[in-house]
Image (cartoon, coloured by chain):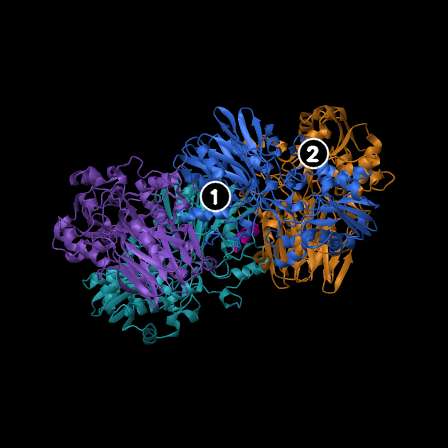
Chain colours: A blue, B orange, C cyan, D purple
């Protein structure tokens, strides 16, 4: 897939008889954040219960008998997306560990920048890791902490780790939510009657009819127990710097960030794009479904309508996952078909939300020309992606990012379009409601466009970064 | 699901080394016509090979080892949608029978009107039926024919059956395509290099890069073998009368009928609807995804843009198929969420392609009001559905069709909208490019709106219609 | 496996609330008669219910949810053993057909000699076969009969077929048991309180605590319904001629035939063998488990004890069924190991019940020598098998039968034993309690030893005998 | 099952291209030692590969594709038997851990007496346990050791643990075998060409044609690497005291201990039993299969033959594992049937190898009487079992051991036999080749008969002994 991918979605609920069912629903609403695997851990204040599976929530957590194996009024859950080579069942979250003072379970959205260094140290001192996930490093640090109370152990561990993270933690008596000091990864608080909820996006509140309360702040720890919710801020205070990609395409369009729907942010990106790079053409055509909101904003700005020049096969999402060579060679046609009579002999403004490797654009453009399109003006509703990410977003290597290798004219030639324009950094910040980017302390984590990382990516300098750290190679080892 | 459903999609290919793979791809493109089960039968001019499975094509026919079990250069395939109570593996098509002169395999889109009468007669004379499908009646009639050649046996059988049907038939040496005398169900001819293709829609030609040749005509039999394609017209000549629902919503928007894309027909339906029943409101909002093309036509006509006021969860299609009671009670929220900030305090024109039971509209309207919508003007881009179908379309019983019980004002109250309008029959025919409906011999099979059936539904008068005919009750009997 | 195999075991029960459970137990007791597949059909006097599976009864019919899918007070069941090339799910019995007058289900132990000829005729007249089993020929003949009552239809069909058969037939109101005119295959009647039972061996009565009533006689039809049991004898009267292999090794040792346990018959075979061919040696060693009863009889006759010189791995029965080449090359060691200290430097009398291909004996003898055995005197408790069977017993081709190719001295050299002796035909008949064999009309079907077939094997002369008759090649076609 | 069960069988091989296949075969030969689960870990001197499964070796490790996932020339494997409540996949051995200096994998037959105390200490210091198995305690102790070399780390750990154990350990470069100071659990050394083998019994050498070299001695560590085999004896020297149950019934009859086959030891037990408690009766009947060797010894001593009065269904071993209530109520008949004509009106000497709960004897005796037996003299070829075990043998609680609650006459009445006799302790030691038991330092671990434990069972005093130690309750947590 020619997309930047999110590492995961998380959900936690405290004090609800239907904790497991509601967590399944919340994870289902967050399915776009990760499709490889999903897991739920519940606690009935005495024991913990866990189910972790490969595949979609809807395929794994809808049967009554699965839900029955997850009793208890408190639960956390996790969606994981597919990363090559690490699809071990042991890596499916939430993680669980039996500590001296009782069990603890953790679900994590994000990525640590110094996990490998910490892991090495821990193993030297006799810790046995079960997974290759950086999340287990957090768990092991908590187990090793000499502090007495569980929250203190967690803070102890947090001071050692660096990176972008949103965590939900379940103990026998508490549900804890944590967001890293920059607030890179999202976490919101909701309420359903008397039950508190912590989750990645507001759409996971909507699906169960819960009320949005507020975001967890950057660097904040919220502790939910029988007595209600308490807030701690153990880190030095700093301004938030959330990940700009949540706005551009991670979050669902119906999720709300700072009172504005993500759909609206994307229409604004399209509107700014139209201001910067409109061109005379017959049709405004979105790449479905990623380019639709920006297209509507673009078309509206120039007083036009969008036209569905490209039709998406709705059954493609999960099918042909193990294709034969013959099928693979048919490429993008499995997913898209051209509305031939519509585009024939027309000039098109083709709109997408981003451009990563360029492979999908290349195929779509080829199909449009084959269907008779006369001119194709490709417009991208975000700036060129030139730098990889290390905080919970799976970007291709730098060398695979088209914009890190080619300038815009070279890209235009590569994709073979009549013209190619990206939204400017300024347009991006204007769409977000800022007059301009604060270059001394940017309002967003935007290093994929700018190369300015909020935290130094320590592990990235290691040769074995991203490699399997364990010497046990076995997909089925459980 | 609150939708009228199509019985199936069919595909056949002759003389291609990748026959099974191409059939799988064709069926994948036709997945919208049936999701319950799928099957492929191939022939290597000596033996036949069959695989029939529950579930989607992409989940069943993409692995190399399945394709390897389907050798041969000729193939037919079938997608089946779910009908309650009959989901026996024996009912999955294509059917196969060993006749005296060699094997024969048949895939069928449509429904016979006199299958039960014929079946009764056959059983009395010693035929043993394996399935409860009316398609097996055709197979048994062919087996019983005293004519000598296989094509003659088929024609012999066709003269006995009545109803709407498109058939692909595979013998050791031939691929045969048949369309009923009225041409109720669709069948088109394509070509990929030297290979002939027969399939339900042109989108199944596009996916494999095949060229559209022409439609099989109503009452025509096309016989494809080593010597090319031959055409027979054994029935008395009559004008075609295709099913209007293919235009309104069975076919994929990118399929082409009579040189016009289905997307375009649907935009025209929306355009006519706007002419007939526009109203002053803040937003034009489609019910996703069924209402989108009509909404674009509607909005264009009134010089407006569509707005995505309802967001669809793309993972819902196949998930939560065995929901627990708790999840079921959350109802339509699994599938749709409201773009809350967009619709709040707004008046909406809500557009869908049809209205069957009204249950989905009811839920969506409720969600929109809860999200703060001020007024909802529901507009349906087809006339009220008052009569059930018996020719291959699965309509609810008459008593479940909202428009057969209530008048428009009663429906408005039931759905609780500010106003409700349907497209008129005249508007429907205008959208199709006709000046008006020919009431003495309508241009389309449109009885669901008008009650005028092209063929008398004989079996429908039987008490046991739609019931399991066999006394063997066993989902797993194979 | 170097054994002659039985085609199947059958069981039927009438008027018992636990019909499906009791049938499962009965089939479990008959598991030695067939391990490839098993099936149960029940009837609740309105509908029929069927479950047919590959594998053992204990793996398929012990879960409550399977039994729940088999309601009704009447049931029949069938165990099938593995024949190469025909392991299609469609061939698993009992068969079911919806006749004009209601459903009928049939389970069959045996083999027809003219099934292919009859099948050809039926297909020419429009019958569609679903399986490649000769049993379906009986079903199709019944369906075609113009007689009015079901029992008459069955008799009509029986007069057309030739061969060895024991049948249980289930209709809505009756359980019917049939044994061929010679009584080649066995069928006994039992009673459990008010419920009648029909089954292949008495051990299937013992497992459920039922009482043995009597054997079904050769050529007899017993009809069980609400009014009790009725007997018909439509065929010309003749003397019975049961299959001798039931005594030698098909039946379980605890089954009883004519008041004597099969264990006892086998001890007698060993005793006669000792009389005919004792030799001076250190130990009497059985080939486990087949040679054990004859060994006990042999040892007793010569006033000695058996010694377990060969140990069988009890887990081998079902394991390593898809062995890698490496494992296969280890051959018989998977199944047997030698009790090394016992046989070292000893002379042995090695006893088995029969010798078919000789491959197992060859391996065991080799292992015994490697373990230090000094002399091996192989004694076989039945005569040499020189002729194949066609009545429900799966013998290897004639050319694979060791005794049809080699004389006894040649066999001795092939197997590399010190001496080799078989039981004589006279000894065999004496063991069965007869003074001598009646050569003009033998008391048993014994053609495997003598070449005298009770019924002419018509189909056997066809070139395609044993071939797949259908042109559909698909293990998974269901 | 009314049997004392063994905890497991282990196997290891060094330097063989077919390491995984040979390990699978070895485990198959040891299947009688554990049927619940099995696992194999291989090492190709760089990485480790693991497969762990529920079920039999033959069902899990015979397919080529599984073996292909286990490359490498060194391997260890483990069979595990079923213990209630702990059948978690995480508990399936061999265990694996990534230590600082490289991976280590361990397979363990036996039980530690102080595992819970050690575990508690480790968790307090930050160790995270993944399983509830005491074997993991050994792994965690090794990980924590501050010694530098892997063998030193292992010795460090061994000095902390107490109990009965035989271990195979695999590191990147070595295969290590360890037997506890008393030699309670068995471990033998074999050789196949240049490959060293370590395994529980000699029958696992026979199956692959390997040569028996010698036993690992009590308290010995053997280290196998490229340079050959080295032996360490780090513990204070003491006399061996192997578990007497290996002789009585754990080991396969064809295994050899101290140059004598286990079959021979068991015949001797029967012979001593005859000397002590013969009685005048018609038949000597073994309980199959456990009582067969002792019966042969018994019969030989009194110049009689054994008779198969009880027939065992060979398919029962693995079937009906999830029985419905109806089937369960049929009890032992699923497994055994009586040879009715043989026992009718006879007096029997019924022989079994041991008596645990008495439930099986009770059922068999009842069946024999129902079949017409006149008198039943039950003879047990070992002394009464009065005390539970804690060293790797799963005995019922003391209160379930019949002999711990009742005296012999009370037992006789309970089982309802004419007479009941056990072998004496003296007879037991005589059968083993000793003049008498050395009461100051017994030659065998025999506490189940005598109550004299070689190691104090520390954990046994804890209330939670045998309980789930972890708070995570989830069979499927992986």
Residue farthest along the front direction in this orientation: A440
Return the residue nearer the eye: B255 or A205: A205
Q: Is residue C471 above or below residue D3?
A: below
Query: Residue shown at 55%/24% (left/top)?
Result: A193
Helix, strand or loop at mark 2? strand
Decide whether residue B376 is among the magenta residues. no
The boundaries of the magenta stretch are C137-146
Helix, strand or loop at mark 1? helix
The subunit letter for the residue under badge 1 reads A
Decide whether residue C142 is among the magenta residues. yes
Residue hosting label 2 = B310
Return the residue nearer the eye: A207 or A101: A101
User: Based on the displayed image, in which of its 4 quarters is residue D369 positioned?
Assistant: top left
The nearer-to-camera label among 2 and 1 is 1
Q: Is residue C463 left or right of residue D249?
A: right
Q: Tag on residue A136? A: 1
Q: Mark 1: few, some, or many residues within 10 Å (few <14, many ≥20)?
A: many
Q: Is residue A230 above or below residue D281?
A: above
Q: Tag on residue C284? A: none
Image location of residue C361, percent across then percent down:
33, 67
Residue farthest along the right direction in this orientation: B435
The subunit letter for the residue under badge 2 reads B
Task: State whether the magenta stretch is mostly helix, strand or loop.
Answer: helix
Query: Are the residues under badges 2 and 1 in a single subunit?
Result: no
Q: Is residue B333 left or right of residue A151?
A: right
Q: Is residue C283 left or right of residue A202?
A: left
Image location of residue C172, percent across then percent down:
50, 42
Image location of residue B19, percent across then percent down:
66, 59
- Mark 2–mark 1 Cα distance, whole angstroms, equals 39 Å
Image location of residue A39, percent across then percent down:
51, 40
Q: Mark 2: few, some, or many residues within 10 Å (few <14, many ≥20)?
A: many
Return the residue nearer the eye: A128 or A318: A128
């Amino acid at each position: 897939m020619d997309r930047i991918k999110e590492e995961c979605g998380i959900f936690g609920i405290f004090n609800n008889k239907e904790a497991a069912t509601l967590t399944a629903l919340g994870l289902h609403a967050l399915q776009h954040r990760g499709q490889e695997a999903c897991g739920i851990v519940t606690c009935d204040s005495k024991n913990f219960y866990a189910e972790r599976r490969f595949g979609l929530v809807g395929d794994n957590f809808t049967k009554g008998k699965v839900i029955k194996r997850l009793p208890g009024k408190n639960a956390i859950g996790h969606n994981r997306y597919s990363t090559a080579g690490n699809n071990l069942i042991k890596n499916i979250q939430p993680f669980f560990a039996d500590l001296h003072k009782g069990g603890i379970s953790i679900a994590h959205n994000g990525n640590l920048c110094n996990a490998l260094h910490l892991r090495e140290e821990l193993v030297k001192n006799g810790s046995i890791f079960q997974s290759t996930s950086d999340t287990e490093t957090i768990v092991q640090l908590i187990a090793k902490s000499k502090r007495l109370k569980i929250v203190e152990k967690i803070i102890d561990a947090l001071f050692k780790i660096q990176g972008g993270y949103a965590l939900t933690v379940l103990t026998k008596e508490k549900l804890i939510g944590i967001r890293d000091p920059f607030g890179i990864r999202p976490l919101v608080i909701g309420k359903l009657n008397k039950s508190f909820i912590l989750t990645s996006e507001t759409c996971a509140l909507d699906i169960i009819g819960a009320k949005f309360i507020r975001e967890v702040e950057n660097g904040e720890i919220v502790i939910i127990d029988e007595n209600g919710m308490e807030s701690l801020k153990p880190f030095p205070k700093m301004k938030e710097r959330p990940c700009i990609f949540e706005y551009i395409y991670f979050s669902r369009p119906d999720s709300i960030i700072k009172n504005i729907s993500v759909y609206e942010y994307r229409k604004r990106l399209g509107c700014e794009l139209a201001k910067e790079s409109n061109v005379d053409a017959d049709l405004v055509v979105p790449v479905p479904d990623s380019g639709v909101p920006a297209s509507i904003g673009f078309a509206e700005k120039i007083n036009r309508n969008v036209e569905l020049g490209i039709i998406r096969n709705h059954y493609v999402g999960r099918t042909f996952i193990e294709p034969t060579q013959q099928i693979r060679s048919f490429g993008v046609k499995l997913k898209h078909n051209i509305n031939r009579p519509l585009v024939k002999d027309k000039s098109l403004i083709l709109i997408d939300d981003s451009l990563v490797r360029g492979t999908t654009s290349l195929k779509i453009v080829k199909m449009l020309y084959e269907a008779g399109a006369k001119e194709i003006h490709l417009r991208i509703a975000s700036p060129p992606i030139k730098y990889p990410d290390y905080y919970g977003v799976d970007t291709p290597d730098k060398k695979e990012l088209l914009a890190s290798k080619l300038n815009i004219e070279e890209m235009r030639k590569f994709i073979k379009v009549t013209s190619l324009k990206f939204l400017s950094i300024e347009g991006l910040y204007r769409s977000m409601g800022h007059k301009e980017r604060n270059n001394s302390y940017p309002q967003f984590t935007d290093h994929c466009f700018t190369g300015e990382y909020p935290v130094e990516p320590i592990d990235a300098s290691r040769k074995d970064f991203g490699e399997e750290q364990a010497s046990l190679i076995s997909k089925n080892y459980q």
